[in-house]
Amino acid sequence: MFEQLQDRLAGALKQLKGQGRLTEANIGDSLRAVRMALLEADVALPVAKAFIERVRERAIGQKVLESLNPGQAVTKVVYDELVDLMGTTNEGLNLAVRPPAVMMVAGLQGAGKTTTVAKLARRLQEREKKKVLLASADIYRPAAIDQLERLAGDVGAEFYRGSEGAAAVAIAIEAVEQASRVHADVVLVDTAGRLHVDEAMMDEIKALHEALNPIETLFVVDSMTGQDAVHSAQAFNEVLPLTGVVLTKTDGDARGGAALSVRQVTGKPIKFLGVGEKTDALEVFHPERLASRILGMGDVLSLVEEARHQADQKQTEKLTRKLKKGKGFDLGDLREQLLQMEKMGGMASMLDKLPAGMGLPQGAASQLDSKQNARMIAIIDSMTPHERRSPDIVRASRKRRIAQGSGTQVQDVNRLLKQFVKMQKMMKRMGKGGMAKMARAMQAKIPGMPM
């Protein structure tokens, strides 16, 4: 989501790296470029102006002006202000209430409310070990209730279907009563959306809130809508006591301005990011980690946390022992790694969290998708055990057989083998402590930034 903003900010801050010392003049040139980068990324004008003024005030301070490394000093100032802009720390869901904890989800039609409800349910069940009941108070959109019921089945949550023709408020109240009967810890209520903010919609959503008195009122907003996302968030915030925001579709080619503007405009924290269509594609929002990604420093912490949660620990330990003993990384190991990557959102999601400048071609992450992973797995599955252990023996005739067996082309087999050689070298370095060296090198680039 932040590729364009990341590139523009990198260019703006790069101007300072060649400077022997900082002056108000060269800081001013860079900050004008930063301001343009923010506006082109759809950051609200008042937010961009206030941000630049705060950075300017800190950047022309004596400590920064006298810095021996001007580029790093100003980048650290920009990083700190980005973190402050987006909320300083993550604020999780409030579950400190006598069960069932009622949570209401609101937003415009098409923002992804229903899918977000299912994602939240899955997260609460898997990571918080809560029993969750879902209910739909959307009595207008065709098949809305059926959609949520199907998703509830997919994630293993309880579902309450209201009586035919019942009002939205009645359905919501009955759902909470049902949750008490089945001893659910959390009730997630999906509400109706409209194509735009209107009076009737706001009246109904206010009535629902008064009837439920939820512990959490989450506003779901489509990050692809840019400035409209900020305007709709502001409108909802004026009529509902929102407790947080969920930004959806952040895996698309949105320019990222919504993430930088919504919190500042509403004063409410962003709690989660929707990063895909699947029910496990929901990330906790950490301002400091996102600021690090925007500045090209990656988000290794989130990557490690996701790996810890999703990865097969036995397979990981087996591979670690193998590398420590100096045994080669083979195609069978690559297959296991590809399967684990899919659990973590695919290769593109992982590369998006790695620091920039790691030798990856421009736009490499956006070109990778789950189909390519599936193709590589199919190619490896078409090999014999001996070929997986010793890919050097895979010559022309074997390549033709493997391509035919996997439904691919010989070029695809060649591409996989080339990628494997590169990964094999990387694994060899990691086995010798290369990952720790990389982390220390990134930390040295901008002291004080989390790695």
Image (tube, rainbow, N blue to C red):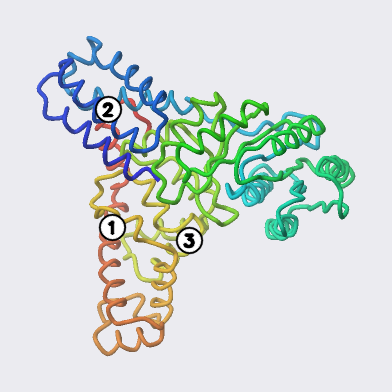
Quadrant of the rendered image containing residue 364: bottom left
**Cβ atoms at labels 2 and 1 below 8 Å apart:** no
Q: CA distance from mark 1 to mark 3?
A: 23 Å
Q: Position of residue 37 (x, y in %)?
A: 30, 35
The mark that comes first in sequence, 1 or 3, is 3
Q: Amino acid at mark 1?
A: Lys
Q: Amino acid at mark 3?
A: Glu
The mark that comes first in sequence, 2 or 1, is 2
Identify the residue position indicated by label 1 in the image.
428
Residue at the image point whose x is 34% and y is 89% from the top: 401
Nearer to the camera, 259 or 200: 200
Q: Amino acid at mark 2?
A: Thr
Identify the residue position indicated by label 2 in the image.
75
CA neighbours of label 3 inside 10 A, class few (<14), some (14 to 19), many (20+): some
- Res. 342 mark: 3
Residue at the image point whose x is 55% and y is 23% from the top: 267
Q: Secondary structure at mark 1?
A: helix
Nearer to the camera, 245 or 403: 245
Q: Position of residue 360 (x, y in %)?
A: 26, 53
Quadrant of the rendered image containing residue 208: top right
Q: Position of residue 314 (x, y in %)?
A: 52, 58
Nearer to the camera, 440 or 38: 38
